[in-house]
Amino acid sequence: MEREAMEFDVVIVGGGPAGLAAAIRLRQLAAEHDRELSVCVLEKGSEIGAHILSGAVMEPRALNELIPDWQARGAPLNTPASEDRFMFLTEKRAFRFVTPPQQANHGNYIVSLGNVCRWLAEQAEELGVEVLPGFAAAEVLYDDNGAVRGVATGDMGRTREGEEGPNFTPGYELLARITLFGEGCRGSLTKTLFERFGLREGVDPQVYGLGVKELWEIDAAKHVPGQITHTAGWPMDMSTYGGSWMYHFEDNLVSIGFVVGLDYQNPYLSPFEEMQRFKTHPLIREVLEGGRRLAYGARAISAGGFQSIPKLSFPGGLLIGDGAGFLNVPKIKGTHTAMKSGMTAAEAVFEALADESASGVEVTGYRERLEQTWLWDELYRVRNIKPSFHWGLPLAFAYSAIDTVLLRGKAPWTLRHRPDHEQLKPAAACKPIEYPKPDGVLTFDRLSSVFLSNTNHEEDQPCHLTLRDDSVPVQVNLARYGGPEQRYCPAGVYEFVEEGGESRLQINAQNCVHCKTCDIKDPTQNINWVTPEGGGGPNYPNM
Amino acid sequence: MKILVAVKRAIDYNVKARPKADGSAVDLANVKMSMNPFDEIAVEEAIRIQEAGTASETVAVSIGPKQCQETLRTAMAMGVDRGILVETDEDVQPLAVAKLLKAVVDKEQPELVILGKQAIDDDSNQTGQMLAALLGWAQGTFAAGVELADGSLTVRREIDGGIQTLKLKMPAVVTADLRLNEPRYVKLPNIMKAKKKPLDTLAPADLGVDVAPRLSVLKVAEPPARQGGIKVPDVAALVDKLRNEAKVI
Amino acid sequence: MTALVIAEHNNAELNAATLNAVAAASAIGGDVDVLVAGAACQAVADAAAQVAGVRKVLLADAAHYANALAENLAPLVVSLAEPYEHLLAAATTTGKNVMPRVAALLDSAQISDIIGVESNDTFVRPIYAGNVIATVKSADAKKVITVRTTAFDPAAASGGSGAVESVAVADAAGLSEFVGEELTKSDRPELTAADIIVSGGRGVGSSENFAIIEALADKLGAAVGASRAAVDAGYVPNDYQVGQTGKVVAPTLYIAVGISGAIQHLAGMKDSKVIVAINKDEEAPIFGVADYGLVGDLFKEVPAMVEALDK
């Protein structure tokens, strides 16, 4: 099939903080050196920010470096962090602990990362970047030497059966001398690059968390702008990694969320319902009571840290942002590192492309530069915190304190990770979890939550949640693990339904909020998340 | 022949509208905005007429804040030749929009104006009819099909319970209904080309139109939640209730 | 204070929607006159005069009013508007076509699709597809209004004793010409236009079982709808879908069969006047919005209902 092709110097996949920072830095450098350099950013969301979901407390370090006058340019960093609280919860009570040093937020801002990205995109466009939302990069293109040559966007207008519909429009080939992949956690193309170039050889498997977030508008009397609360403990048991955030920011808004480590073992666990249950804690209920829920969403994050960082370069391309796993888990922040990785990649790429004939080269200078930055140092120091949670909460707390305070992150050992999808125990060996029924005021069911993500996908298109083997859901997942996908999916995509006495997996792909959890946690890695038609997915406001 | 097509920047159809906590207005802060879906159909129709060789030029006009430029760029990426933005931050109601559009029509002299039948925000369903009235033109509202021949326009209209066919004298105003066509996907290269198409900006004052609103919104609220009614014991009771209490069958 | 209601009719019979518009006009509080403009439509005028609350009927009888063409009708209404403070029509496709043209000629803003009357200048209307309800106040001397018919109980068709008065007709505008009309003759009405809708959900279980839903629909002269779950499961085609991503409907009677009532479905039918739910799951959210709920097996209850309707 003929596809139209377009040439750029650099194509960036993903309009998040990493991709946009890279695009901005590239055009800044081009302007400084008076060089022509075409840059395009592809974004699968219907607009920049539509798929971005984060807490978020943002450390402005990378932004200060990238756009020092961001304040004058109206960046939406409006709420300085004022108070840090770290609480340990039991079912009924909350104990205030000393805030771990990584979580001290003085000088940081509570933001909507979606809005920050919308603003970054405006800055990028002003600098001449082609920002193209609504187009999903669906395929990596390679040249005859096997180097990445760019990406192709997905076809539009295919029917459910994959046929060309009446409005069929083929995808486009976006050819580039260098392609940056900033797809975010568990990028669908990044996953194929890992395989093809063996980028994960010799590093730990990536491990993940799933964050479920709600945005609430609360009673002004209860609103404490800048207040940051993190909790550990209830409703997680001592052996399951998870915790919450609650940030008060502008306009009486509160961002509240719960992260569950996807290395959880009990297939009956439901991150969505843990979030709902969490809100019933007196500490949280008191704040939310009388308010109204405005938005809902979910997204997986990379939690492997330093020891899970893959090889970052390959002929013709680089990995940037959380797709490469630059999140600082103990800090619970990845925006500053994502941006820094994008900026550093931009500098390395700019240097490599000085040679006008350079195309499809491997920009090894990226990693060399990165190792010299604060990002590398920061991630190295905290590398042992997350894996220590395998030992359970009390030991992990103790270890983390020693590792951080006494060893200052310079322990002569590195704790290892194990892949999340191998962690589930058979349902028969686990105890079902009784979650309370939603009350429709403080706690909700999945579908009314998904409603607030404004997610949608054109109905008549091939299902973007593909199964390698159609028999696995019933014969393995349901039989052995009790159908965990119906619980870990925070959007109600997966349902086992009975028809004529037989179970069948119903995939409600329209509900998908692109969190990628199924791609991560499916025990036999049978589910492969691929990009739906561009523009599909959530439309998060202020998330 | 020149076609003018009017496009409105409205809340994206996937996004749920919600009143602000104080009930003063609908909360649109950082909410995704798009071209009103019915206007997209209007644009598609204009382009199809042009592609069929019947129109020589298509011009899109939008009225509203600066961000309406994006809406016009979308129309141009779909294929419209150029754009006109009547820029104002006022709440411009349908009557004022119709007056502004009339002024643009006076300047541009199109023979056909196509609009969406209504915008999915205020759901007024007025502008096309009002514009036709002010111009003294024929109107083909809720169009499901249009055909141009021998200086007249045959419009198939979606009416309650069926389809009505009218023959209109040109020039005329047409408003697009859902089934008129299915808008195309915007082609990626055309998005970049659209950035280079001409876009003029005017102010309402340039057009001599007073856009002051005639309707004031006293409050907006969420619709009252529907209350559950009663459970009936059996089918006989249900049919009885429907017949004698609700009187709906 | 007097209101003029523009009657909708086919030159032989008064359309029932006019009765709802008269009711809305009466709710404003003043006298109510009705304009019957058509061709050889004396019978309609006589019927309109019988409607409870109607003071008098203006009859404009001329060939060029036969099809309610907006270009001809609007100038007539404008020529008669002088004594009236309120000009109303039902928000049918005819009313929606004509009234904005009237409003513009009078230099008045129109208040579309009202569902409530707060005072003689303040009205309630749905916006954002019914997700938001706005209360709006008009600053115009003449208020041009269309009325959502389901929001006002119809005025009684008899009991009134209005006088019928012929009025001078205006010239034909010569802008438009009626060519023809194809009214849908199918036994089953179109979803968005239907008065009654019977919808099936995943509980129906299969494509074949949808015959049960269809049988009830046919008995009631209703359209057939479906929830997304039923569409996704392949029981019925896409265009049956009622809900957030399907069609938004507001019939007089909506019967939800085997539909749990997820918010995505409710978004598409919650403005229905009367909602009936038949579901075996007593806890199904649909019962939270249904006026009449029947807990039971749809395979038993729905055929029983078809039978009961024969009695």
Image (cartoon, grey):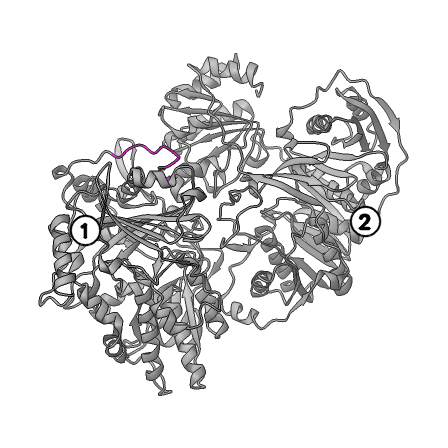
Q: Is residue A206 above or below residue A6?
A: above
Bin the neighbour count of mark 1 within 10 Å (Cα to Cα): few under 14, some 14-19, many 20 and up: many
Nearer to us in this view, A131 or A158: A131
Instruction: Give above or below for A42 relative to C288.
Output: below
Residue type beneath disc 1:
Asp
Residue at 78% across, 18% down:
C160
Verify whether residue A437 appears in magenta: yes
Query: A326 or B194: nearer the eye?
Result: A326
Residue at x 37% of width, y 41% of height: A287
Which amino acid, mark 2? Answer: Leu
Indicate whether residue A2 is drawn in magenta. no
Name the spot of residue B123 as percent of width and height, x first: 62, 44
Q: Nearer the viewer, mark 2 or mark 1?
A: 1
From the top left corner, tell me how far across and down residue B243 is, in percent. 55, 16
The residue where tag 1 is placed is A263
Q: Residue at x 51, y 44 (%)?
A: B18
Residue C305 image offset from top left, x and y in percent: 46, 18
Residue B120 location in percent, x, y? 58, 47
Name the residue nearer the viewer: C86 or C96. Answer: C86
**Residue range of the region highlighted in magenta in the rendering:** A435-447
Name above or below for residue A7 compared with residue B231: below
Q: Main secondary structure of the magenta part?
A: loop
Instruction: Judge left or right: residue C249 versus residue A174.
Output: right
A20, above or below A55, in the image: below
Quarter of the image for the N terminus of chain C: give it: top right
- Residue that protrudes farthest toward the left in the picture: A412
On residue C175, the disc is 2
Numbered disc 2: secondary structure: loop
